[in-house]
Image (cartoon, rainbow, N blue to C red):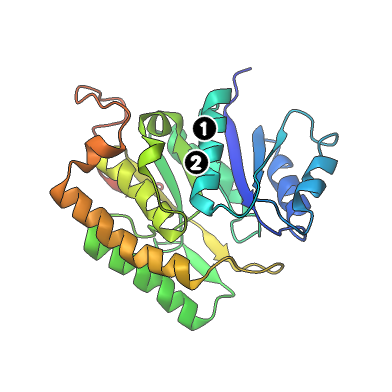
Amino acid sequence: MALEKLVIIPTYNEKENIEGIIAAVINLQQDFHVLIIDDGSPDGTASIVRSLFDQYPGVLFLEERKGKLGLGTAYIHGFKWGLEKGYQYIFEMDADFSHNPGDLPRLYDACKKGAGVAVGSRYVKGGNVENWPSDRIALSKGASLYTRIITWMPVMDPTAGFVCYRREFLETLNFSSIHFVGYAFQIEMKFAAWKLGFKIVEVPITFIDRKFGDSKMNKGIVKEGILGVLKLRWMSIFKNYRKKVANTFDDTTTTFTQQREVALEGK
């Protein structure tokens, strides 16, 4: 049977969450495989994952990196791993249950029906955020509005980190051209998909703040997001951004690359 669905979960000090999130994904019993990419967690996260190999043979995998190298590089590492293994749909997901594993099939369905990228969106009709203070909600919504204004990208939740990518998009993308590691990484992945002509579908989700462990948000990530959006806009105006981020691009391709709209699930 061909490999189809791979969920990439980057980790750094997630010992309280990792066993539960792995079980929640695999227990969906919808053939989701899980790849944990651990950046040398000193709390033993990787050891917990290794202890679960016998329980989840052939569906749970671990890649260990030395040191905290950043979210963006972790996902790119996972994308390359998944493409090499032959997966058709590759997902991004947090380890802390802020993303509900039960929403994975909805993201998959959106891509299966033709989207190049399916975004678990907090800010479309039906989306929501729980257990966040009002100032953080305001900051997040402000960042999304700022991104849309600067880039003109028609995505309501451009910083979202709960995403399904179709293989065709990831194969088209030149990973060496993606340099951001935090919020700006999430923005650029969607921006690249949009510029390359792939259809982006936003699927409404409820985002729930983590109960265990510490947030990885810091001032550097916020600063990168602010400046990164400006850089994306500058490159799209004064440079051939599409050529920069594409491995190869054929204007005659119509299967997935001539659609530029963003649609809500079920619309």
- The image quarter in which residue 173 lies: top left
Cα separation, mark 1 vs mark 2, equals 6 Å
Instruction: Say whether residue 229 is left or right of residue 202.
Output: left
**Nearer to me, 248 or 165:** 248
- Residue drawn where x is 49% and y is 38% of the image: 109
Q: Position of residue 121 (x, y in %)?
A: 44, 57
Q: Residues within 10 Å of mark 1 (few under 14, many from 20)?
A: some
Instruction: Say whether residue 236 is left or right of residue 44.
Output: left
Q: Amino acid at mark 2?
A: Ile
Relative to 240, residue 161 above or below: below
Assess whether mark 2 and mark 1 are in contact (beta carbons under 8 angstroms).
yes
- Residue drawn where x is 76% and y is 46% of the image: 23
Q: Which residue is tagged 2?
A: 76
Q: Can residue 86 be seen by looking at this rendering? A: no
Instruction: Say whether residue 38 is left or right of residue 241.
Output: right
Q: Which mark is residue 171?
A: none
Residue lying farthest to the top in this orientation: 1
Relative to 219, residue 61 above or below: above
Looking at the figure, which quarter contains the N terminus?
A: top right
Q: Position of residue 115 (x, y in %)?
A: 38, 37
**Nearer to me, 185 or 157:** 185
- The image quarter in which residue 259 lies: top left
Q: Amino acid at mark 1?
A: Lys
Q: Which residue is tagged 1?
A: 80
Q: Position of residue 14 (x, y in %)?
A: 71, 58
Q: Secondary structure at mark 2?
A: helix
